[in-house]
Image: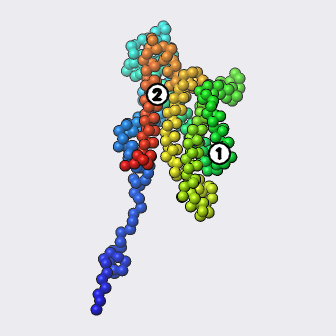
Amino acid sequence: MAVVETVAGTPDAPGAPDAPRARPPAPQDRPLRAALRRIRRDRVGAAALAVVLLFLLLALAAPLIAALYGKNPVEHYGQNTPGLLSDGGLPMLPNGGISGDFWFGLEPGLGRDVFTQLLYGIRTSLLIAFASAVITTTLGVLVGVAVGYLGGVTDRLFGFLSHVLLAFPTLLLLLALSPIIQSRLVDPGTAEPEWMQFLVLILVFSAFGWIPLALSLRASVRSLRERDFVQSARALGAGGFHIVVRELLPNVRAQLLVHATMAVPTFVASEAVLSFLGVGITEPIPDWGRMIARGSEVFQADPTYMFFPGMALLLFVLAFNLLGDAVRDTLDPRAAR
């Protein structure tokens, strides 16, 4: 008699345990988590990420830190307290008035605390930079993906318009548009509210900042729309919205993330330049660019005052740029190990 054997662990074997089922991918295997692990293994990228997180933490905790420190960025300590400033408005103590009461010294002339000005200056720069980056990224995605997918006349018109806009000198346009927008939004003789200054800068940065991303996405989408997976989706009856959202956008996420990471330090530096030239954030809002402008005026008598905002701006922009390079290398499939 033939004997039929059963394999243990299969559904045919009575009383045998169920076969182990395939588990879904662990959360740590997702692309974003894998990218973060690779950045942590990159010493330069990890250090840049730590510096960026430190600046973000200082910006969020600025009111709490200022309260514990016992100072604020608007009070004129040097003018209100005798013996802190000379008759010429310079700090009496060496190194810009650095002491146990004023950790980074005093501002020449008005005698404001430099440490709290730096803290709140981070909030000013980051608010403008992040808002501008969100708007420019959104506009770049909408225009670039739509133009790249549609092609034809739309593509040619966009190519002409983008080259015309890129031909303008951006810095001169920013200098010219900022006061014009302010004069249109504020009545003559009326003090400009603080939110208006932020809104004007964000609008000016957003007017031209989306074009490079749109051009990059346009080229990528023009290549992707001819790939087999897009043609297969179209053959199965998928509509244009489905193809764009489910097929094209997931393949350009790396470009979006890299652009957003690199756009933030660009906007921070641009905002500082405009404030340095006198058309950005005005008094009494703390701002790094205006601090550097004031420091350049008193550099020979008090070089310390210019050192702190200059180093803060340098460290922040450098860290964000290095982080952007690390993100780009991490998301590049050719760099995968």
Quadrant assignment for the N terminus: bottom left
State the SS at label 2. Answer: helix
Task: Give the residue at mark 1.
Answer: 155
Query: Camera-side residue: 306 or 69?
Result: 306
Q: State the residue in front, 323 or 85.
A: 323
- In the image, taking residue 282 as reference, residue 54 lies left or right, namely left
User: What secondary structure is found at the residue carrying circle 1?
Assistant: helix
Residue 176's place in the image compared with 97, above or below, is below
Q: Position of residue 153 (x, y in %)?
A: 68, 46
State which quadrant residue 168 falls in.
Answer: top right
Mark closest to the chain's N terminus, 2 or 1: 1
Q: Residues within 10 Å of mark 2 (few under 14, many from 20)?
A: many
Foreground residue among 219 and 36: 219
What's under tag 1, amino acid-wise?
Asp
Q: Mark 2 — residue?
A: 313
* Residue at figure coordinates x 49%, y 30% from the top left: 122
x and y percent of residue 48 in the render? 40, 36
